[in-house]
Amino acid sequence: MAKKNPRSPQHQPWENGWTPDTSREPGTRRLWLAGAVALATIVACVTAIAVMDKDSDDTSPSARGAVPAADTSGPGLISFATPPTGSAGTPSGTSGPPSARPSKTATGHRSTRPTATPTPTASAKPSKSPASHGSSSRPKPSSTGTSIRSVNYPDRYWQVSGSYVALDPVGSRSDRQDATFKRVKGLADASCYSFRTSDGSYLRHRNFVLRSEYDDGSSLFEQDSTFCPRASSYPGAVALESINYPGRFLRHQNFRLRLDPYQNSALYQADSAFRLVQGLS
């Protein structure tokens, strides 16, 4: 009969007085092993993340020298969302390549066909109006002008003869030009008239005789060349009164124009009545 081995002291703590070591908790080696594996895993993950961040930094816009402008319209937080369309477009004055933004087809699938960017067309230049050439603040004299015809001598007109103004018939082309004036606002009173000749001089009275002289810029010249229209006893005619000699009107006498005081006579009223008609030249 086989002989049985006695139990080891480990399995008989109470029989031989041996007790297990309770200074170390069971499973300590396994805990250390699990902690080492976890620490290695964390280190590997951190290393992988650092490598991926480095690669993304190498292909970032700042590495290519094109740093996008900061969006100041937001609340101030860092956003990793895709910027809205048009926030970082092609700079003005340059044309970029067509965008490769996918578009939905009729079947619902996305196509990668690039959409063509419309090319701006040059705007048509506005045509210049004729008034833009050589325009000045002062209006040009009318080509027709004004001619002054006598009432009691309807075939005679005011006409510059030398330095005086006479009442003569008009025949030749030069006579028509000398009998045509530019009627403008009175130099001394805008509600009255001044008469300018074709050579730029004005009609003025000197020693009560009407003559043609150039403007010397004096106040006396402005008053001598200003005549105010008054009602006449003849229809369609006016009487021209001097602004600095009230009561004196222009009249013809011996077919010369002069400034005479008003007379209550039919001859004076006829001699001082004139019709302003369209220019003869």
Image: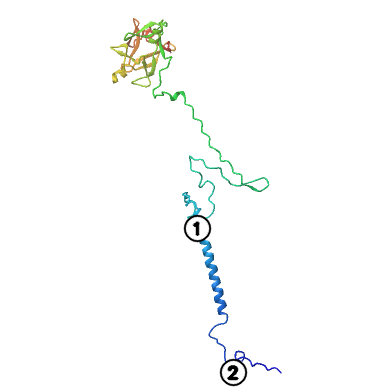
Percent coordinates x, y for residue 77 in the rendering: 49, 56
Mark 2, secondary structure of its residue: helix
- Which residue in the structure is indicated by mark 2? 16
Q: Residue at coordinates 51% horizontally, 56% vertically from top-left?
A: 55
In the foreground, 181 or 97: 97
Q: Quadrant of residue 227?
A: top left
Percent coordinates x, y for residue 161 in the rendering: 34, 8
* Label 1 vs 2, first from the N-terminus: 2
Mark 1, secondary structure of its residue: helix
Percent coordinates x, y for residue 88 in the rendering: 50, 47
Compute the Cα span from label 1 to label 2: 67 Å
The quadrant of the rendering that contains the C terminus is top left
Residue type of the residue flagged with mark 2: Asn
Mark 2 residue crowding within 10 angstroms, few (<14) / some (14–19) / many (20+)? few
Q: Residue at coordinates 61% horizontally, 94% vertically from top-left?
A: 15
Which mark, by number, is residue 6? none
Q: Is residue 238 above or below residue 113?
A: above
Mark 1 residue crowding within 10 angstroms, few (<14) / some (14–19) / many (20+)? few
Q: Residue at coordinates 53% horizontally, 67% vertically from top-left?
A: 42
Q: Is residue 123 above or below residue 76?
A: above
Q: Is residue 157 above or below residue 189?
A: above
Q: Is residue 96 above or below residue 134?
A: below
Q: Residue at coordinates 56% horizontally, 75% vertically from top-left?
A: 33
- Which residue in the structure is indicated by mark 1? 54
Percent coordinates x, y for residue 49 in the rendering: 52, 61
